[in-house]
């Protein structure tokens, strides 16, 4: 059966309002153990926000109002992603005071680390899908076992990446097109980031477990703690304030890794010993190769789709690097601002993944479909507004981070061009995450391959290098890839084959 179009009059906005009581069952008719939390029955946005931030462990996302479930999941996920992005924004703000070479170091390192992010996010998507499906089926012990096995995969990834990154730091920076001055100033920053990569892997992975279980507030709390430490330590270690040593750009790496390590420790304390939806004990941590293989199989598509995307970003950075450090600095600042600007849409998209997985697990594919279309529209509306604001205030935003005119001019141009693709990107983010939450990681992988490797990378090279448009050609290629992802994702989701995926 084909899915309804997002423009169908009987689509996700059919109800009278986001808190339409007709979608909720009468709490008095439910068994005592299944009654909805009191705030669920109380109308009003403020109470909904309070309930979301409180992180009620008993809320059932497979019944009741879809809009309410979406918001309860999305609020902590949005804040979680905002806090994750704060790492990047805070670092680039302080590092920018050291000059364009320091900013270039951070940007080139982040481009390489994006491959690690692809691995962590891809494994996290498979973990979220498997945990969400088991929770939807009411089998929490199986969900906890899947979570425990995911940690073994994370350990293997972090050790392998550390060995390669620490051993070949200078060679990797040179491969990325770094100038000799950048390598001399930033090699230690890069080395520290690779050595501490386990903090990234486990923060992503544990938070993916929490999201799959519908416990997004725990993921948010761990990032609150990590960011608070990073924000305090960044200026102290970069500039040597008070008794702290002046480490320059290396200080940003040390502060980030310390903050993330504390956040990981806090998250693990809930996962293995404190109250939460899932508890992973010694039994769940015993290695189960069958489950690990199943996780890897489910995650393979997620890893592939993010590797496709991130490798394209690495190649784009190499193209941009050919135009000098000032252009790199503007591009890096613009991309970080863009990533921060789209975070609410990413949070909503993660909520789509959880709702798709849990409702399919509960045998409610039509509800899963309706929830995803609703979230896709919310994402798109937000992205339209964010795109307008980024275009209007681009010079002021980039100028806040860098005083150098060349970097500001290039960054503002990048921000404006890429923001043209925000509306289709809103649909693309929500629908591709819904595929992932349903366990169908192949479809978004194919979409990414089409958009990034068949369109974005070749077009960026032709426009920037062959046609002589310079870095501007790269920015237009990014816009085109966002447009392709949005259109193709809508068509693929409407076909409805994702509802038949077995996990």
Image: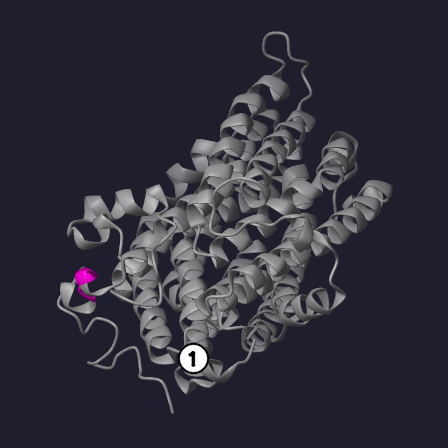
Q: Which residues are magenta?
A: 24-28
- Asked whether, in this view, residue 60 is left or right of residue 221, the answer is left
- Report which quarter residue 17 is drawn in: bottom left
User: Where does residue 437 sit, x and y in percent of width and height?
Assistant: 49, 68
Let me know if residue 26 appears in the view: yes
Q: Which residue is mark 1?
A: 493
* Residue found at the very far right of the displayed protein: 167
Q: Residues within 10 Å of mark 1 (few under 14, many from 20)?
A: many
Tally of numbered tags: 1
- Asked whether, in this view, residue 418 is left or right of residue 384, the answer is right
Name above or below for residue 228 compared with residue 462: above
Q: Report helix, strand or loop for mark 1.
A: helix
Let me know if residue 404 appears in the view: no
Q: Nearer the viewer, residue 440 or 411?
A: 440
- Residue occupying image coordinates x 61% and y 56%: 147
- Asked whether, in this view, residue 380 is left or right of residue 486, the answer is left
Prevalent SS, magenta region: loop
* Residue found at the very far left of the displayed protein: 16
State the scheme by which the image is colored: one colour
- Residue 119 magenta: no
């Amino acid at each position: 059966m084909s899915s309804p179009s997002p423009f169908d009059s009987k689509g996700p906005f059919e109800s009278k309002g986001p808190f339409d009581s007709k979608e909720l069952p009468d709490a008095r008719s439910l068994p005592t153990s299944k009654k909805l939390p009191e705030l669920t029955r109380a109308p009003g946005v403020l109470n909904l926000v309070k309930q979301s931030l409180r992180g009620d462990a008993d809320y059932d996302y497979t019944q009741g109002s879809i809009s309410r479930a979406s918001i309860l999941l999305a609020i902590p996920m949005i804040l979680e992603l905002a806090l994750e992005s704060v790492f990047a924004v805070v670092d680039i703000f302080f590092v920018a005071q050291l000059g364009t070479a320091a900013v270039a170091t951070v940007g080139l390192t982040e481009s390489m680390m994006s491959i690690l992010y692809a691995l962590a996010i891809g494994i996290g998507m498979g973990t979220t899908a498997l945990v969400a499906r088991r929770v939807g089926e009411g089998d929490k012990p199986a969900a906890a076992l899947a979570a425990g096995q995911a940690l073994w995969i994370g350990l293997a990834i972090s050790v392998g990446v550390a060995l390669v990154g620490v051993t070949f730091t200078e060679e990797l920076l040179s491969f990325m097109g770094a100038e000799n001055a950048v390598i001399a100033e930033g090699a230690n920053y890069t080395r520290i980031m690779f050595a501490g990569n386990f903090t990234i892997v486990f923060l992503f992975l544990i938070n993916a477990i929490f999201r799959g279980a519908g416990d997004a507030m725990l993921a948010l709390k761990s990032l609150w703690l990590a960011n608070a430490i990073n924000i305090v330590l960044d200026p102290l270690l970069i500039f040597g304030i008070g008794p702290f040593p002046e480490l320059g750009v290396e200080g940003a790496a040390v502060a980030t890794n310390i903050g993330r390590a504390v956040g990981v420790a806090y998250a693990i304390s809930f996962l293995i010993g404190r109250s939460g939806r899932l508890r992973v004990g010694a039994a769940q941590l015993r290695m189960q190769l069958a489950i690990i293989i199943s996780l890897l199989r489910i995650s393979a598509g997620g890893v592939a789709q993010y590797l496709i995307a991130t490798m394209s970003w690495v190649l784009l950075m190499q193209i941009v690097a050919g135009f000098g450090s000032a252009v790199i600095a503007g591009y890096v600042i613009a991309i970080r601002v863009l990533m921060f600007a789209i975070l609410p849409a990413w949070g909503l998209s993660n909520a789509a993944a959880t709702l798709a997985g849990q409702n399919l697990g509960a045998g409610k594919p039509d509800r899963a479909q309706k929830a995803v279309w609703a979230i896709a529209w919310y994402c798109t509306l937000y992205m339209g507004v964010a795109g307008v604001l980024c275009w209007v205030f681009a010079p002021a935003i980039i100028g806040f981070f860098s005083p150098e005119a060349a970097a500001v001019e290039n960054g503002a141009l990048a921000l404006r061009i890429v923001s043209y693709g925000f509306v289709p990107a809103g649909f693309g983010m929500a629908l591709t995450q819904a595929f992932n939450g349903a366990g169908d990681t192949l479809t978004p992988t194919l979409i990414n391959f089409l958009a990034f490797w068949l369109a974005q990378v070749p077009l960026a090279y032709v426009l920037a290098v062959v046609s002589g448009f310079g870095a501007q050609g790269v920015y237009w290629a990014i816009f085109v890839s966002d447009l392709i992802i949005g259109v193709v994702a809508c068509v693929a989701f409407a076909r409805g084959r994702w509802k038949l995926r077995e996990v």
